Image: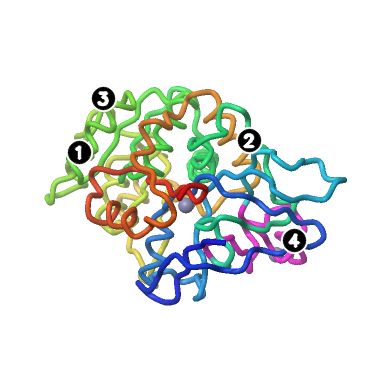
Amino acid sequence: MKALLVRGPNDFSVVDRPDPVPATGTAILRIHYTGICATDIATIAGQSTVARFPMTPGHEFIAQIEKIEEDSEFRVGDWVTIYPTEGCGTCSACREGHPNHCPDFKVWGVSRDGGAFAERMVVPVKQLLPVPERLRNSAGALIEPTAVAVHALRRARLETGQRVAIIGIGSIGLLIAQAARAGGAAQVTLVDRLPGRRATAEALGFSDFMLASNGNLANELSQAPGGPFDIVFDTVGIPATLEAAIASLRITGYLVALAFPHGDESLTLPYRMFYRKELSLILSRNYARDDFIEATRLLDSGAIASDVMITGSFPLSRFALALDALRQQPADHIKVLINPSIE
Ligand SMILES: [Zn+2]
Ligand SMILES: [Zn+2]
């Protein structure tokens, strides 16, 4: 089968790899659409702390079952995605049903080979999730990133009528915004340093956009429309954005940090302000299986505008071109998909 193979940092190509071999309790999937994520870009650049080369990345996808055992609850031809997190199965987190808190959890296409930038994948049947009819197309590739947003909102314990700001509106930030609105947020303010994101925000029905200048983000966000905020989501995770979140939160507000740390850097917090406002710092990492159920429901309900979110689609053979589009024109793209089922 054709698959993207990353041999080392920035050393990748689409090659022939052996077809995956089915084993007891597994299914062979035929991949239709796979989203390119910031994690994939970090993996390819050699900046991932969990990837091991050589590997085929890709973890946001929709597929059809090509082979499965007959006594399974799924059938050949069913449209599926997967819960891509698998724990060791024996630690206390795994035994309590939280593989996303397992110290050794692995994610297909992120921390283990066999990802979805390929024509086929083999996965345990227990990881399969059904996809409703409306999402049996490119929209189905948004289930995984939407689960990231759902998890962050769950961690934030959003309540109806709350005021929310999101710093950094790439695909995850925009998904959080839409999920927050669907969850009853009365105010959603979006912050980004790309001027083009204003039009994206408007296309999604968000009128409160703040362009982050190179000045003092904390001052700017404190005066942004809609504040002070009950919850600020920081998808960037650098000192300037954390400081801005803290400055713009109301008393007892929640700062939700969800950027993936790509190095070992420590972050400092303005302790005095943090203390005075009695703020809470909440971290959000990965997702639980339930987050996929809620993400699927949200997408199926139309609360997430997949047509605005998906800005490009390329065949697998054009992977390098898709990556260039994302790297060189970040303002033009939100989510770019690879379609391994067409030439
Ligand atoms: Zn992702
Ligand atoms: Zn475990």
- The type of residue carrying mark 1 is Gly
Name the residue located 35 percent from the left edge and 69 percent from the top edge.
Answer: 45
Name the residue located 37 percent from the left edge and 55 percent from the top edge.
Answer: 318
Q: Secondary structure at mark 3?
A: loop
Q: Is mark 3 within 8 Å of ligand 1?
A: no
Please state the horizontal and vertical placement of residue 282, each as a whole percent of the image.
Answer: 47, 50
Q: Which mark is residue 131?
A: 2
Q: Secondary structure at mark 2?
A: loop
Mark 3 lies on residue: 207
Please state the horizontal and vertical placement of residue 285, each as a whole percent of the image.
Answer: 51, 54
Nearer to us: label 4 or label 3 = 4
Q: What residue range appears in magenta? A: 84-110
Mark 4 lies on residue: 22
Tell me which label, 4 or 1, sits earlier in the chain: 4
Packing grade of label 1 (10 A; few <14, some 14-19, many >=20) is some
Give the CA separation, mark 3 to mark 2: 32 Å
Tell me which label, 1 or 3, sits earlier in the chain: 1
Please state the horizontal and vertical placement of residue 66, each as a whole percent of the image.
Answer: 69, 48
- The type of residue carrying mark 2 is Val
Nearer to us: label 3 or label 2 = 2
Tell me which label, 2 or 1, sits earlier in the chain: 2
- The type of residue carrying mark 4 is Pro
Packing grade of label 3 (10 A; few <14, some 14-19, many >=20) is some
Name the residue located 68 percent from the left edge and 62 percent from the top edge.
Answer: 87
In the rendered structure, the answer to whether residue 168 lies left or right of residue 1 reads: left
Mark 1 lies on residue: 196
